[in-house]
Image (spheres, rainbow, N blue to C red):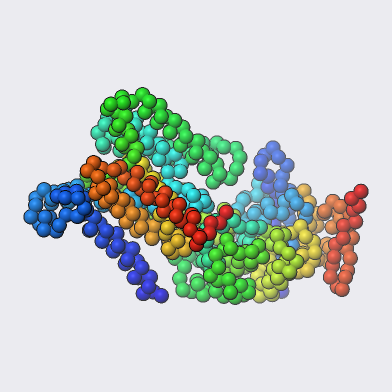
């Protein structure tokens, strides 16, 4: 029993590393699909490509996948709703608006776009939170959901206006490409910038994973079990939103990972968050890296990552929902 | 032998300053290792009173004591080791197994970053056995019937090893046979040393196991005392606001409504 746990944990760590190692060789240089190992040892350009471009990009992909999947799992537990995803509280639409705002009026430098996206993502959350406090009816979760929907809609309408105003030859394509999500421009600096937030956020979520089960109970039951419901929920939401905001600010809007990966993980381990949260992180990292491999390999240009994750994510979702083995409660 | 374990001292509570008080100047004492039923019609303030005793809400005036110490002096963790709750119902959207769900009852004894250990699993299994649902251990909670869910909630509260167990309408969703199963378990828990407090609008369920009754109407306590003193035609009629008769059939107290509908 104990040995089995150790083996599972090792697999959860080793498997993403293995995928990372193999993915380093996937791409279109010198020819599509895999770069032979001999090229890496002899070709200086190949070394630069692998260590300066692909390595930071793949690590970022792994962090992106792990973060979105973990944040999605956390949100689903806290909102007691398996269909919630991390972009829920105005975070994703806020980031999109912030990026477009930056492209139009501030700067098109990637770092400035990222900072704006992160700032507006957090603004989206803050707005959702305070509007929820102003709503005069319903429980706390319902109010957060409603205000999150309203704030997302506001930002997406604002984004529509910005797109309409954007120069169709220069600014609009940039906005659209950012919104589609991708890791094509990620550098080591980007990675250093998101790393601390992601590591802290994921650590908090990982350490408190069993308590997520308690927080998925009704407030009164959780209280009777000694849980400081408000405080623990706020800490976990803050951690989830922070990691979502930073990865979205670097990668643009990459959909479906936060929704689908926790579902797949629950299928593998059962509903206990102590088990499925670590699996979500691991599977999310693997999924994002494989999708990014496809983004690099499939065409000479590059397919935006967000398109691939949505395509595959929605496909898996449809298969899961229609397969006979699944039972959905309510 | 029995002594006061929980004392409610003239507490009042209102959900909104402009609305009438949900609980008004309520006082009574709960004796250790007894079953107390809080009975009254819908909207009498029973659930509010339970939530106040749980510490979930603070009374506007008055205080509640556990062994002569105000509950506000206990930490969250200490309080959760004292008092367990079985809510009226529990919506669980995720497919926890019954064992995983019952294991959540160990939270009061675990640090914020701890996972339940082998001992905790052992206690959870004992709780399942005690409630008589060991065979449901691996079943997903959302697949349980209403009666089974009630028992799972009881096992979860028992796994918490509280000295006082609060139950909010534990029998109201249940058919007669499941109701009796639940009442039998409560009776046994009391005999094993747990103090039971439950709310109900069903006076017969109360009469089957309660040692004491608290009669509530419109947020006020009309009377509190032993079953014999309080389970009378006059007092129950006043509590429910409709004429009733108490009939004794084979030593069991049955309440009949005497109101004609037309």
Against B191, is A280 above or below?
above
Corner quadrant of residue A329: bottom right
Q: Is residue A78 left or right of residue A204?
A: right
Q: Is residue B200 left or right of residue B247?
A: left
Name which residue lies at 68% across and 52% down: B48
Quadrant in the picture for the N terminus of chain B: bottom right
User: Which is more toward the observer, A269 or B184?
Assistant: A269
Q: Is residue A135 left or right of residue A290?
A: right
Q: Position of residue B182 (x, y in %)?
A: 69, 68
Name which residue lies at 55% across and 60% down: A225
Q: Is residue B125 left or right of residue A47?
A: right
Q: How many marks?
A: 0
Corner quadrant of residue B173: bottom right
User: Which is more toward the observer, A199 or B12?
Assistant: A199
Against A290, is B248 above or below?
below
Name which residue lies at 16% across and 54% down: A35
Q: Position of residue B203 (x, y in %)?
A: 79, 61
Q: Position of residue A167 (x, y in %)?
A: 31, 24
User: Which is more toward the observer, A310 or B169?
Assistant: A310
Asked if residue B233 can be seen in this view, the reply is no
Name which residue lies at 90% across and 56% down: B258
User: Which is more toward the observer, B193 or A296?
Assistant: A296
Q: Position of residue B226 (x, y in %)?
A: 80, 65
Asked if residue B174 can be seen in this view, the reply is yes
């Amino acid at each position: 029993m104990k040995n089995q746990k150790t083996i599972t944990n090792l697999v959860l760590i080793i498997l993403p590393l293995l995928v990372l190692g193999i993915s380093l060789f996937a791409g279109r240089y010198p020819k599509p699909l895999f770069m032979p190992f001999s090229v890496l040892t002899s070709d200086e350009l190949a070394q630069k490509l692998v260590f300066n471009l692909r390595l930071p990009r793949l690590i970022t992909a792994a962090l992106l996948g792990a973060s979105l999947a973990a944040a999605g799992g956390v949100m689903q537990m806290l909102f007691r709703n398996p269909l919630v995803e991390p972009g829920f509280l105005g975070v994703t639409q806020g980031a999109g608006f912030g990026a477009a705002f930056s492209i139009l009026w501030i700067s098109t430098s990637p770092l400035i776009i990222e900072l704006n996206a992160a700032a507006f993502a957090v603004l989206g959350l803050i707005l959702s939170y305070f509007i929820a406090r102003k709503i005069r009816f319903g429980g706390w979760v319902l109010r957060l959901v409603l205000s999150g929907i309203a704030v997302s809609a506001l930002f997406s309408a604002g984004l529509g206006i910005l797109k309409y105003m954007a120069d169709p030859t220069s600014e609009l394509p940039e906005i659209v490409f950012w919104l589609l999500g991708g890791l094509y421009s990620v550098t080591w600096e980007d990675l250093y910038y998101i790393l601390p937030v992601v590591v802290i956020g994921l650590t908090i979520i990982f350490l408190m994973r069993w308590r997520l089960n308690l927080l998925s109970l009704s407030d009164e039951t959780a209280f009777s079990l000694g849980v400081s419901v408000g405080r623990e929920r706020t800490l976990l939401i803050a951690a989830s939103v922070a990691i979502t905001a930073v990865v979205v600010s670097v990668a643009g809007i990459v959909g479906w990972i936060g929704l689908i990966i926790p579902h797949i993980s629950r299928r593998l381990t059962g509903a206990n968050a102590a088990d499925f949260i670590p699996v979500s992180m691991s599977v999310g990292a693997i999924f994002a890296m494989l999708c990014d491999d496809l983004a690099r390999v499939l065409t000479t240009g590059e397919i935006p990552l967000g398109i691939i994750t949505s395509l595959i994510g929605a496909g898996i979702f449809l298969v899961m929902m229609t397969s006979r083995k699944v039972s959905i409660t309510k | 032998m029995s002594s006061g374990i929980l004392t409610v001292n003239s507490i009042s509570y209102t959900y909104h300053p402009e609305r009438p008080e949900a609980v008004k100047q309520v006082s009574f004492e709960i004796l250790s290792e007894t079953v107390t039923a809080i009975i009254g019609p819908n909207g009498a303030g029973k659930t509010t009173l339970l939530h106040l005793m749980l510490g979930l809400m603070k009374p506007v005036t008055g205080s509640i004591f556990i062994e002569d110490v105000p509950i506000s002096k206990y930490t969250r963790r200490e309080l959760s080791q004292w008092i367990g709750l079985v809510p009226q119902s529990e919506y669980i959207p995720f497919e926890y197994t019954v064992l995983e769900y019952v294991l959540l009852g160990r939270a009061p004894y675990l640090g914020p970053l701890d996972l339940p250990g082998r001992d905790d699993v052992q206690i959870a299994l004992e709780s399942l056995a005690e409630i008589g649902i060991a065979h449901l251990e691996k079943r997903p909670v959302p697949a349980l019937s209403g009666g089974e869910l009630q028992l799972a909630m009881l096992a979860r509260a028992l796994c918490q090893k509280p000295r006082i167990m609060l139950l909010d309408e534990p029998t109201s969703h249940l058919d007669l046979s499941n109701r009796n199963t639940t009442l039998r378990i409560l009776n046994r828990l009391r005999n094993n040393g747990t103090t039971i407090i439950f709310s109900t609008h069903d006076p017969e369920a109360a009469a089957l196991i309660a040692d004491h009754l608290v009669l509530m109407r419109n947020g006020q306590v009309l009377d509190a005392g032993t079953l014999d003193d309080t389970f009378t035609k006059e007092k129950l009629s006043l509590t429910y606001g409709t004429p009733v008769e108490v009939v004794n059939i084979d030593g069991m107290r049955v309440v009949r409504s005497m109101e004609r509908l037309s």
